[in-house]
Image (tube, rainbow, N blue to C red):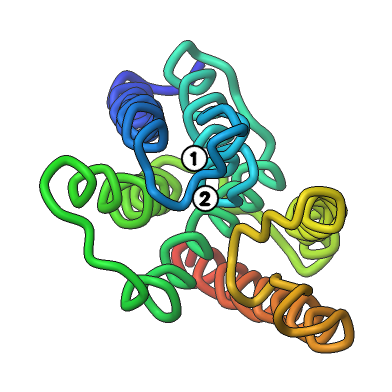
Amino acid sequence: MPSYPSRALAALTAATALAAIALQLPLAATAPGRPPDTAAWWWLAGYFTILTNGAVALLMGATALGVRLSARLQGGLVLSILMVGLVYHALLARLWAPEGLAWWTDQALHTATPLLTLAWWLTFGDRRVTIRDLPSWLIWPALYAVYALVRGALTSFWPYPFLDADTLGWPQVALNVAGMVLAFAALGLCLIALARASLR
């Protein structure tokens, strides 16, 4: 069973992700960009950020209860939530300026949860990961891309500007998705190198 400090930090990480999602629901209900005929929860379920924070809440919550996750699963979770933070701060943060509760929720989703997950992994996680784990880590972002594009084609809801096929056209979106997968792979390689360095 994971140690008490490991479980405590996992519980804090899960609670942060869960609280951020819970706070986002009432904010989404009044968000000007939400289509009026779309339920807030279904609108939020279109975002990689929300779905990945949900995965953090679920898996870190399981860890807090004593469940041991495989090294591969831990690494994939860290990779995905770190990409949430990196893409947001590099590309998306400048597109809007949240205030008050929206700002705090935004920071919890895109900053606190990624940093807490990384801190848990570096301190308590099973970092025995190798290049053989990388292909499995790319499954989640690839599945999300398919889901977001199919959903967008059916509803014209595009959760991120770089996936907006109505504006950019499908060839450009295909290039953007390929670039996204390559970015995940590059960050995954960095995580593997970091894991190896931390185990020496």
Residue projecting furthest to the left: 100
Residue located at (87% from left, 80% from top):
170
Percent from the top left, x then y, of residue 35? 56, 43
Q: Is residue 34 visible?
A: yes
Labels 1 and 2 touching (C-beta < 8 A):
yes
Give the answer, above or below, for where 105 lies relative to 160: above
Residue located at (66% from left, 79% from top):
183
Residue at which label 2 appears: 49
From the viewer's perspective, is 181 left or right of 135?
left
Which of 76/67 is in front?
Answer: 76
From the viewer's perspective, is 65 left or right of 115?
right
Residue type indicated by callout 1: Asn
How far is the residue under mark 1 from the one under mark 2?
A: 6 Å
Residue 6, image quadrant: top left
Residue 45, image quadrant: top right
Q: Is residue 20 visible?
A: no
Residue projecting furthest to the top: 65
Which of 156/141 is in front?
Answer: 156
Residue at which label 1 appears: 53
Residue located at (40% from left, 80% from top):
90
Q: Secondary structure at mark 1?
A: helix
